[in-house]
Amino acid sequence: MSDNNLKTIETAALEALAACTDSASVEKVRVSVLGKKGELTLVMRTMGQLPKEERPAFGQMVNDTRRVIENALEERLNALRAAEQAARLEAERIDVTEPAAEIAQGSLHPLTIVQEMLEDIFISLGFSVADGPEVELDHYNFELMNIPKEHPARDMQDSFYFSPNLLLRTHTSPVQARYMTTHEPPIRIICPGRVYRCDEVDATHSPVFHQMEGLVIDKGIRMSDLKGTLDEFAKRLYGPETKTRFRPSFFPFTEPSAEVDLTCAMCGGKGCRVCKGTGWIEVLGCGMVHPNVLRACGIDPEVYSGFAFGLGLDRITTIKYGISDLRLMYENDTRFLSQF
Ligand code: DAH
């Protein structure tokens, strides 16, 4: 074994290292030169065949070569690792200045928009908003509203019953009763919410719909207060030109009772498709609270009087937005909902 041989191994190893492009290939070079069966290791093993006196010098030469290769290996490895890390950092770099992906934003349901609009109107007239359960006792939904069992007026409202005494409320009127039995007059509330009736679904009917109840109780409340309040409401809802029309009607919980029409917001009263040519749109029922209702709710009709009204939110909403089919409001198709 000569100097020359070692030099050849060294030169070849250094060249191989220079050609390495990643740390894995550096490791291959290490194994092939310095590993258990590597070239230099095999050379070292031939030492035993040499005469004893030559062995130290030979060992020294092999070790020098090994050190040169080891140093080169480490240097190459460090360089490659640094390059690999730099490349990884570059690839994983986060550009914090890049605009974020837009998050799709929902919008208010048209019914919610109208409900909030009406709440704003009545709050500005001094009313507050009251709430009640949708699963209601027969007692509040009918009995306290002066509709006893077997009363024919129960047929006006086909109900969903859970049991003989429990049902889905058929109107927002039970909230009146709940409020009167727990509060002293003066009372001035509105009660918006969902109501349920056993109706077939079509373009103008839904078993779920929305009402808003109004109730005012105080000393000396008269029919003219009711008319003035609803007139003001109509003007704020559809504009100052809007007129109201009171038609005599019947409700068990009011006496006298009336149905109220507003001049059609679409045609201003001239007559169009929306108002079926009449110029008027029916939006609510109302009246002076029946003494039986006051009494049943613990309020003395000799001292107090009041008015009440119940309006249909769905109808006001479909008219406001020109929605031709009620079903659109309950299907939750985002192509419809995103227009509001
Ligand atoms: N509760 C009635 C209904 O659902 C609406 C109504 C009419 C409510 C007259 C009232 C009222 O408070 O005074 O048909």
Image (cartoon, rainbow, N blue to C red):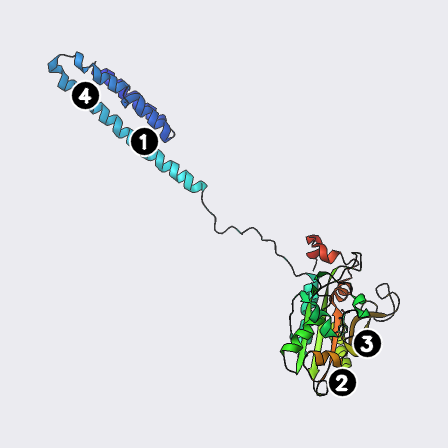
Disc 1: which residue: 76
Disc 4: which residue: 61
Percent position of residue 282, x then y: 82, 70
Q: Mark 4 and mark 2 in contact (Cβ < 8 Å)? A: no
Q: Mark 1 and mark 3 in contact (Cβ < 8 Å)? A: no
Label 3 sits on a secondary structure element that is strand
Q: Please report whichever mark, 4 or 1, sits nearer to the chain's N-terminal start.
A: 4
Q: Amino acid at mark 4?
A: Met
Label 1 sits on a secondary structure element that is helix
Location of the N terminus (image quadrant): top left
Q: Which quadrant would residue 232 be assigned to in this image?
A: bottom right
Marks 3 and 4, how far apart at CA: 118 Å
Q: Mark 2 and mark 1 in contact (Cβ < 8 Å)? A: no
Q: Residues within 10 Å of mark 3 (few under 14, many from 20)?
A: many
Disc 3: which residue: 258
Mark drawn on residue 21: none
**Residue drawn 35% across the image and 37% down it:** 82
Looking at the image, residue 129 sits to the left or right of residue 68; the answer is right
Judging depth in this view, the residue of 252 and 200 nearest the camera is 252
Q: Which quadrant would residue 238 be assigned to in this image?
A: bottom right
Marks 1 and 2, how far apart at CA: 100 Å
Q: Please report whichever mark, 2 or 4, sits nearer to the chain's N-terminal start.
A: 4
Vertical relation: 142 (above or below) 335? below
Q: Amino acid at mark 2?
A: Arg
Q: Mark 3 and mark 2 in contact (Cβ < 8 Å)? A: no
Whether the residue under disc 2 has CB within 8 Å of ligand 1: no
Marks 3 and 1, how far apart at CA: 97 Å
Q: Amino acid at mark 3?
A: Ala
Disc 2: which residue: 222
Return the residue found at the far left.
53
